[in-house]
Image: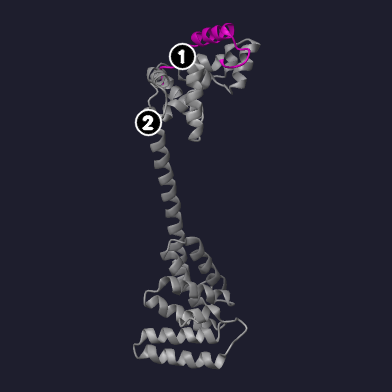
Amino acid sequence: MSSNPMDMVIGASETQRDARAAAKHLEAARAADKAGERERAIIELKKATAADPQNVDVLFELAYRLDLVGEEDEALATYERATDRGPASTNTLMNLAVMYDDRGDYARAERCLRQVLESHPNHPRARLYMKDVQASREMMVDDEQDRDYVKRKAMMDTPVTDFELSVRARTCLKKLNIRTLSDLLRYSEAELLSYKNFGESSLTEIKAMLAGKGFRLGQGADDAYRQARRSIADQLKGSGREQVLNKPVGDLQLSVRARKALQLLNIQTMGDLASRTEAELMGVKNFGATSLQEVKERLAEAGLGLRTLDEP
């Protein structure tokens, strides 16, 4: 049989209550505390809770004194037991909120404070603590977002030479000026295959490597399109022709086949079209060399051209 008083508390039957014994041990605990005998006071309080496990006042005093002597885990568990035994007192909820806050468990801290404010809407300490807890939660979210951003950026900046690729695949990527994972994700399968000496085996190898890391070719294409549009806009700046990028591709008077291909790629403006490459257009079913030549000629008439693979 265990001699630990706390084991007695845990093992006590919830139906066995001896209020008289509990009151006796509580009185002894307060006398010991008054004499400066904290450990003795805690022992008596544990005996009191063993005698009357449902007495939330005794549980509060035990938790409070455990916290004073640095037994934070046991104090927290005891406060939680007090809240489980029925309507928790304001002091129990307040102390529990502070302990949760110290541990970074802001959701539970806020829950405790809300219970206090539901009964006492103008409770000054509860209102003050609530502001602190909510501010801490917002800071935690910001910190997590910052960490995710830094982690993602570090991954995107990883050199492709760090990945397990064959010499041929690495050589092809180097000649395409693809140096980081971010660079690689901007390319589609069609664009890579359009490059001389870049074959199906290298493509399969690269796709498998990316899939193993949760990525796919082309998922960073939007960044490439935005960067290309900014580059074109910078070139046109001051020429008086900046607005040409926002004109609809319908103004190019393209054939039906060419228009359908642009619709499939969600190309709506001339700026969108100028940010695409020949390989992307040729990757669309039924879009052949004739349609490509037509698009290039119409764009040239507007003073624009398709993006080449060696451009951003």
**Residue 162 got which mark?**
2
Q: Is residue 206 magenta?
A: no
Q: Is residue 123 at all visible to an observer of this figure?
A: no
Please provide percent x and percent y for residue 3: 46, 83
**Residue 114 got which mark?**
none
Left or right: 293 in relation to 41? right
**163 or 219: which is nearer to us?**
163
Left or right: 80 in relation to 175? right
**257 or 58: which is nearer to us?**
58
Three-letter residue code for mark 1: Tyr
Left or right: 204 in relation to 176? right
Q: Is residue 302 magenta?
A: yes
Q: Earlier in the sequence, mark 1 or mark 2?
A: 2
Please provide percent x and percent y for residue 152: 43, 39
Q: In the rendered image, which residue does mark 1 sit on?
A: 195
Element type at mark 2: helix
Residue at x 42%, y 25% (from the top left corner): 165
Element type at mark 1: loop
Residue stretch in magenta: 283-312
